[in-house]
Amino acid sequence: MANVVGGFLMSHDPLVFINPRKVDSSVVLAAYETVLERVRQLDATTAVIIGADHYILFGPNCLPQMAIGIGDVQGPIDPLPGVERGDIRGNPSLAQHIMRVGHEEGFDWAAAKSMNVDHSVGIPVRRSLPSDGSVATIPVYLAAGVQPLIRTQRAYDLGGSIRRAIEAYPGDERVVVIGSGGLSHWVGLPQMGRINKAFDKLILDAVERGEPEALINLTDDYILEHGGNGAMEIRQLLCAMGAVRGAGKVIAYEPWDGGVTGLGFAELCVAS
Amino acid sequence: MSVHAIELALYDITTKTSVRKRFVAEPTEVLERYGLSRDEQEMIGGMNVSSMLDVGVSPMLTFGLWMCVRGPQELPEYLNAISGCLREAV
C-alpha cells in the first residue's frame, strides 16, 4: 500500500532567484536544501506539490478551482536565474488515481494531460527534490491568486481526499506532500514589499500546533488586510495539512528584505 | 469593453512570446484584437498599471505585464508607478 511519509510547507518567491536588490539569500536557499535532505531521508518516491497559479497557467477563459497534472510535466514555464527548466518526471498512474478518487468523492478536479508548471511548483521541484528525477512529481493547482478562489475549508478537505487516494493506491509509493505558498505578501499592489511578521507568526504557530481550523476560519477580508493578496496561498498550506494531518515544525522563517514576502518553511509530521 | 477583455489582452501579452514581441513593437495592432475602447487601449499601451488596478484588473497581470515588458529588475519602477493606487483586493 502506498503511504504519505512526510509533508512540507514552503514559500516560492521568485525574487529569491531574481534578487533585484542583491541581498544575501543564503538562509532561504539553505531552507530549500534542508527540505531536500529530509525528502531523501524519508526515501520518498513521489511528491504531490500543491501550487498556486499566478495568471500564468490559466487565463480568463478558464480558471479551475483545482487542477491536477495527470500526464506530461514540464517547467517552470517562467524562467528564473539558477532554476533549471525542462522535463519533470511525473507519476501519471498515481495522479490519475488521485483524480478518480477525488471525482468519486465529489471533488471536481480539472485535469491537465500536459502541464507546464509555473514557479510555485517549479521551485520546489528544482530546489527540494533530487535533481536525478528519482522522486516523481504530481503537480496540483488550487485557485489562490485569481478570483474566484477556492474556499479554505475545501482546500483542506481536498487534502484529505488526496491522502485517502494515496492510501488506497496499490503500490509501494512513498509520498511527500508539499504545500507551496507564501506567508504575508502583497503581489502587484501598492503595499508590495510590506511583510507582516505578526501575521506570519499567526500562520506558522497554527502550523506548529497542528490546528488547521485556525487558518480555515480566517476570513478573506482579514487575510487581505493583514497578509495581503499573496497570503491567500494559505490554501496551499491547508491542502498539504489536510493530507498529512500532523503538527508541524518550522524549518526556517525569513522576512527576507531582498524580496516581498515572509518566507516560511516547515515540516509536517504524518498523523494517522 | 470590460475588465475581462483587458485581462485577456494582458494574459496573452504576458504568457505568449509572439504576442508580447508584437505588443512591444506595435501595441495598437495587438490591442485592436481585443475589442477594447480607445481609453483601454491607451491605458495598456501606455503601461498605466495604476489605472488598470483602479478599474479592477488583477494585480497578478499588472505586475506580470511590467516584469515581462520592462524586465524583472524593474520592480522599484513598478512600485513607483502604482504608489498612488488605493486598490487592495485580489
Image (spheres, coloured by chain):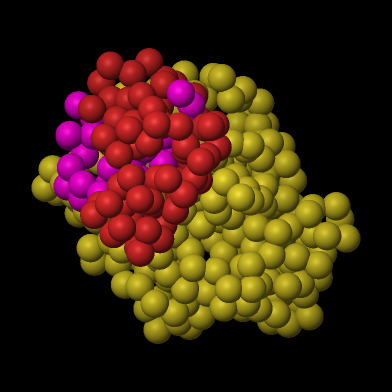
In this rendering, is residue A170 above or below A241? below
Q: Which residues are magenta?
A: B55-80
Q: Residue furthest right?
A: A104
Residue at coordinates 78% horizontally, 54% vertically from top-left?
A108
List x then y, in percent, for residue B38.
40, 31
Residue at coordinates 34% horizontally, 31% vertically from top-left?
B43
Q: Decide which of A81, A128 is in the foreground and name it.
A: A81
Residue at coordinates 73% horizontally, 82% vertically from top-left?
A171
In this rendering, is residue A161 above or below A43? above
Q: Is residue A60 magenta?
A: no
Image mark count:
0
List x then y, in percent, for residue B42.
33, 33
Horizontal relation, residue A244 to residue A109: left or right: left
According to the rendering, which colour does chain A have?
A: yellow
Residue A52 appears in view: no
According to the rendering, which colour does chain B have?
A: red
Q: Decide which of A18, A44 is in the foreground and name it.
A: A18
| Quarter the N terminus of chain A occupies | bottom right
Residue A90 appears in which quarter of the rendering?
A: bottom right
Q: Main secondary structure of the magenta part?
A: helix
Residue at coordinates 66% horizontally, 26% vertically from top-left?
A217
